[in-house]
Image (spheres, rainbow, N blue to C red):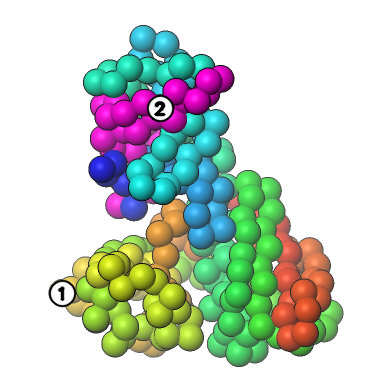
Amino acid sequence: MTDPLYLDDSTVREFDARVERVIDDGDTARVVLDRTHFYPEGGGQPPDRGTLSGAETWPVLDVQKTDEIYHTVEGAGPTEGDRLTGILDRERRQAHMRYHTAQHLLSALLLSKYDAATTGNQLYADRARLDCGYDRFTREELDGIEARMNDLVRANLDVRWYTLDRERAEAELDSKRTRLDLLPESITEIRIVEIGDGIASNPDEEPADPEDVYDRVACAGTHVERTGAIGRVEVTGRETRGKGEERLAFILEDE
């Protein structure tokens, strides 16, 4: 089973690994490594891109997680047992981290101010969209959302992630925000992403004051370590997705 190193450290862009398995698909191959920093597609976040290098270099075209984490590469791929170096596309990963963290801020803002729960989201390297339960946002409301998002960016809030026992997570987290009930019962350890002021302490030793936490949610994505790294937020539009559901689109300007 591949060790998902990206869950602990989102900043690593180069790592060494051993090939555990290779599946030949003709023009491409799916490679299973013993460890990886490549993020597999999921939770609205696209997969990482980059290269795997050993005796030769293979571009990583896709990363998917099913029973294993599969790295799709061009050609026949490496050989089982090979030692490789994985190198991530730095700009793509950084963009995904910024957009994913911004999505957390937006979801928390919409829920707290408009009681609009997030129903879906999709991130890209140059834009993002979020669906939520709301009738219709006015231009004035969109302007207010954009202004508040940029206030949160300028506040440069801490962002951290850690794991909690499921029972504790269900007892402590806002069920309307986290929707832990949607996770299979087999998942007993929950990865938490938390955003707030002065929350960098170990949650098992010094729990953050609830008043200092802006958002706390279950998430397996990658994120920046402070909201100041997100960059300026621009809400670019809205559209109705059906009765009581809105889609907001936004972009991030360069840091």
Residue 77 located within the stretch drawn in magenta: no
Instruction: Please give the residue where the numbered disc 2 appears in the rendered image.
Output: 23
Q: Quadrant of residue 195?
A: bottom left
Q: In the current view of this chain or complex, which residue is farthest to the right?
A: 139
Residue 91 at x, y percent in the picture: 56, 38
Residue at point 31%, 83% (across, down): 170
Image quadrant in which the N terminus is located = top left
Instruction: Please give the residue where the numbered disc 1 appears in the rendered image.
Output: 205
Q: Is residue 123 visible?
A: yes
Residue 24 at x, y percent in the picture: 44, 23
The residue carrying pointer 2 sits among few (fewer than 14), some (14 to 19) or many (20 or more) residues within 10 Å by Cα, namely: some
Q: Which residues are magenta?
A: 8-36
Residue 37 at x, y percent in the picture: 37, 40
Residue at point 52%, 44% (across, down): 47
Q: Is residue 160 above or below residue 179?
A: above
Q: Nearer the viewer, residue 242 or 83?
A: 242
Q: SS at mark 2?
A: strand
Residue at point 48%, 86% (across, down): 176
